[in-house]
Image (cartoon, grey):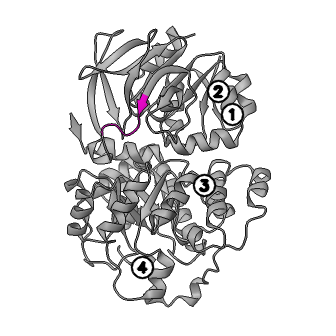
């Protein structure tokens, strides 16, 4: 099995490091043709406006929309997977029926770490929230896997997983393991 | 809830990797930068080439300029303060800029001390000429390191020199045995614990970007191949004859830095890059890279 990590911009090496720890093969994806050889995909954190620009330049948009395998998006990756961004200049991929607000907690000085309670594990997860987005609205069929102060921060929809925080910035592999074990 | 920890500061630097941070002086330029795919903008009153030409004391930008730029873009906004000028940094933090560049491009306010960056919730980026300088700044709490290069010169030679020096000093550290590290820390003038860490991991504990002289897509590719994880472009974009296409081309070149064929397509059709300066033409005392230590 090969997991493609979208490597147009952002913290893609951090995801690779976690997959290496889990002994899962991965490939950094910069060209649309590479997507065909991947069983699953990860869209990392970074700047969503930059990534979308590069997705369109590289002709990946339709492939990512139609990709039959599981996709896991963190932070900017979550914005990309959402159906709609509150910020209309961001044209998302629409794989998960949620509406998302960019930089919803404020600028960098408001970035924080806080424990996230998970539905699938009794130990909380160390959530790193960097200029993080918020899910402002979601439709039926969304499964909430974790909340922070009552708000969903990790959700599953069909074979898509979304976190508004950065599990790749920790050494904790549980969310990547959940993705690999439950979405394939 | 823990805000302003070193972890969240470095976290933002991680998110900027593989991207281009562009100097802008107006909200129109900021818009062009964002539309070209910049991961962040550096809000300035004057770009380095103009600071150089203008002379006099270069200070923190007027908060009005910074606010206008913050209002127009959704990507992170950085701003510069003078070396050691913690009051300017406090003002920038109050403005909620996303990153502060304690920069040699501005006239230093303190010739001995840099800012104690742990006092701030906002992350700092600092320039370096060599590994010792990088580790001193990290010791003071910098969450991101960049080469100094020679800002406003349009000449990549100094950025290459600084990046190569840092990389070769890291390589040297990584093959040293424990009993050699204290002497090396002394030689570098760097905190011992961080020297030990770099020796063990073979890399800086924070991301390492390139700055100072990037003017073309090929320059961006060169710096990425030499080990930079992102690129700052100062005067190179808005001092060229074609800012918008050049900005876009440098963004693409930073992503596809290892694909010469793609780089040839990206670079084709661009107009003239900024004219630039031979470093030998810049008198020693006017070289910005010599500021700070």
Whether callout 3 and callout 1 share a subunit is answered: no
The answer to whether A90 is drawn above or below residue B40 in the figure is above
Res B69 → quadrant? bottom left
Q: Position of residue A136 (x, y in %)?
A: 37, 26
The spot of residue B197 in percent (x, y) is 37, 47
The secondary element bearing badge 2 is classed as helix
> Relative to the observer, which residue lies in front, B216 or B45?
B45
What residue range appears in magenta? A100-105
* Residues at circles 1 and 2 in contact by the CB criterion of under 8 Å: yes
Name which residue lies at 46% across and 14% down.
A156
Return the x and y of residue A157 as percentages of the image width and height: 49, 13
Q: Which residue is mark 3?
A: B224
Which quadrant of the structure image shows residue B101? bottom left
Seen from the viewer's position, the closer of residues A102 and B108 is: A102
In the image, residue A9 lies in the stretch drawn in magenta: no
Dot 4 and dot 1 within a common chain = no
Q: Which residue does the numbered mark 1 point to in the structure image?
A: A60
Residue denoted by label 2:
A64
**What crowding class fits label 1: few (fewer than 14 Cα within 10 Å), some (14-19), or many (20 or more)?**
some
Label 3 Cα neighbours within 10 Å, binned few <14 / some 14-19 / many ≥20: many
């Amino acid at each position: 099995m090969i997991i493609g990590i979208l490597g147009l911009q952002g913290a893609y090496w951090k995801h690779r490091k976690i997959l290496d720890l889990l002994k899962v093969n991965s490939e950094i994806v910069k060209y649309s043709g590479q997507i065909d050889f991947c069983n699953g995909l990860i869209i990392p954190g970074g700047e969503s406006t930059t990534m979308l620009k590069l997705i369109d330049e590289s002709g990946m948009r339709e492939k990512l929309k139609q990709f039959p395998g599981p996709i896991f998006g963190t932070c900017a990756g979550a914005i990309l997977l959402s159906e709609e961004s509150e910020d209309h200049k961001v044209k998302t991929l629409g794989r998960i029926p949620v509406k998302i607000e960019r930089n919803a907690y404020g600028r960098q000085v408001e970035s924080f770490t806080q424990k996230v309670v998970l539905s699938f594990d009794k130990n909380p997860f160390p959530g790193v929230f960097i200029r993080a987005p918020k899910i402002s609205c979601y439709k039926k069929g969304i499964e909430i896997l974790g909340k922070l102060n009552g708000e969903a921060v990790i959700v599953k929809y069909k074979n898509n997983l979304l976190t508004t925080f950065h599990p790749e910035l920790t050494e904790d592999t549980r969310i990547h393991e959940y993705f690999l074990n439950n979405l394939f | 809830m823990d805000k302003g920890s070193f972890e969240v500061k470095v976290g933002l630097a991680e998110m900027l990797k593989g991207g281009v941070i562009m100097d802008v002086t107006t909200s129109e330029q900021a818009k062009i930068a964002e539309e070209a795919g910049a991961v962040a903008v550096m809000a300035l009153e004057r770009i380095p080439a103009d600071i150089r030409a203008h002379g006099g004391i270069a200070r923190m930008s007027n908060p009005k300029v910074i606010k206008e730029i913050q209002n127009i873009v959704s990507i992170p906004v950085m701003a510069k303060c003078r070396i050691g000028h913690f009051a300017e940094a406090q003002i920038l933090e109050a403005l909620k800029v996303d990153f502060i560049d304690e920069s040699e491009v501005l006239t230093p306010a303190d010739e001995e001390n840099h800012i104690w960056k742990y006092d701030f919730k906002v992350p700092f980026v600092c320039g370096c000429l060599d590994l010792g300088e990088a580790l001193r700044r990290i010791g003071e709490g910098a969450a991101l390191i960049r080469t100094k290069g020679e800002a406003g010169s349009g000449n990549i030679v100094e950025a290459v020199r600084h990046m190569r020096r840092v990389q070769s000093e890291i390589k040297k550290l990584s093959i040293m045995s424990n009993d050699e590290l204290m002497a090396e820390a002394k030689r570098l003038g760097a905190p011992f614990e961080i020297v030990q860490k770099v020796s063990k991991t073979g890399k800086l504990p924070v991301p390492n970007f390139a700055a100072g002289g990037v003017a073309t897509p090929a320059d961006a590719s060169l710096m990425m191949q030499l080990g930079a994880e992102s690129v700052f472009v100062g005067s190179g974009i808005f001092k060229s004859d074609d800012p918008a296409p050049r900005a876009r081309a440098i963004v693409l070149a930073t992503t596809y830095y290892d694909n010469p064929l793609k780089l040839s397509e990206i670079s084709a059709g661009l107009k003239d890059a900024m004219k630039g300066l031979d470093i030998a033409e810049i008198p020693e005392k006017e070289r910005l890279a010599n500021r700070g230590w």
